[in-house]
Amino acid sequence: MKFPLFFLFMGCVLELSAQSRSPIVRDVSDSWHNAKAIYTSPLRYSLAQWLTVAGVLGLTVSAHFLDESVRTVARTHQTPALTRLFFIGELYGHPLCAGTLGGGLYLGGLFSRNTSTRLTGRAVLESALYASLLTQVLKMTIGRSRPYLNTGARNFNGLAWTNDHWSFPSGHTTIAFATSAALSVRLKRPLATAALFTLALLTTGQRLYDDQHWLSDTLFGAAIGTSIGLAVAHLIHQTQPPQHTSPSHTISPILSLQFPL
């Protein structure tokens, strides 16, 4: 219920943004435009981008045949050291982590009048929110049973309203990769990028290790998170000073790594 309220709030202040110099109001307005660009992007996909989507779907389907085997390996290699290691991944992929990290950067940049820091925080918040919303819709629509229910990797229930049947795709993995992708674009540091995606991979491993998701759940979640994280960061880059422009609606972000800037 929080997601619709967020978008409703942004819509209510959209008209006010044109007459206001407040960075908060302007950010809300730009976020609203970014959301529309993200969710309508398939209408503007090129053939190459649709082929990318097909490739991701094909990889996910292929991974589906390995789901049971990977689960067996994960369940038979439980150690205290791995449990402690993967706990880092669990924290990194939690919505509170993205919210705290993004919110802290945003507020820090706002109060210090550091535009770059503020926009970096906004990139994290938007990426996590947009990717999570899409993932949650898919979870509830597909209704795949989680591994710990022991009903098999091919148990899909259609519309589902309980967490036990929200396995596909992985929400933690989606958030982790969305956060890492957005920060990697904003920071532009190879070492930081390597560290960020290592954390995202730890999140992926943790979801398998703790029997919360199948391999195919995490792969598709990683694709969603990475695509939206990169797209949001590039959209925000287009609005960064010295010249402020409205976010472009020609970008095609979801499940595509092509960004015609």
Image: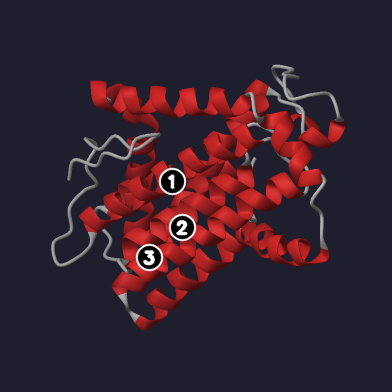
Question: Which amino acid lies under the numbered mark 2 shown in the image of this protein?
Answer: Ser
Disc on res. 120: 3
Instruction: Provide the residue designation for mark 2.
Output: 180
In the figure, 70 relative to 177: above or below? above
Tell which circle, 1 or 3, labels the residue nearer the N-terminal end: 3
Furthest toward the bottom, the residue is: 112
Mark nearer the N terminus (1 vs 2): 2
Closer-to-camera residue (2/185): 185
Which mark is on residue 226? 1
State the CA–CA distance, disc 1 to disc 2. Answer: 8 Å
> Would you say 129 lies left or right of 154 here?
left
Residue occupying the point 41% across, 80% down:
111
In the figure, residue 47 lies in which quadrant?
top left
- Residue 248 location (% of width, % of height): 22, 42
Secondary structure, mark 1, is helix
Q: Secondary structure at mark 2?
A: helix
Binning the other alpha carbons within 10 Å of mark 1 as few (below 14), some (14 to 19) or many (20 upward) gives many
Disc 3 crowd, CA 10 A, few/some/many (<14, 14-19, 20+): many
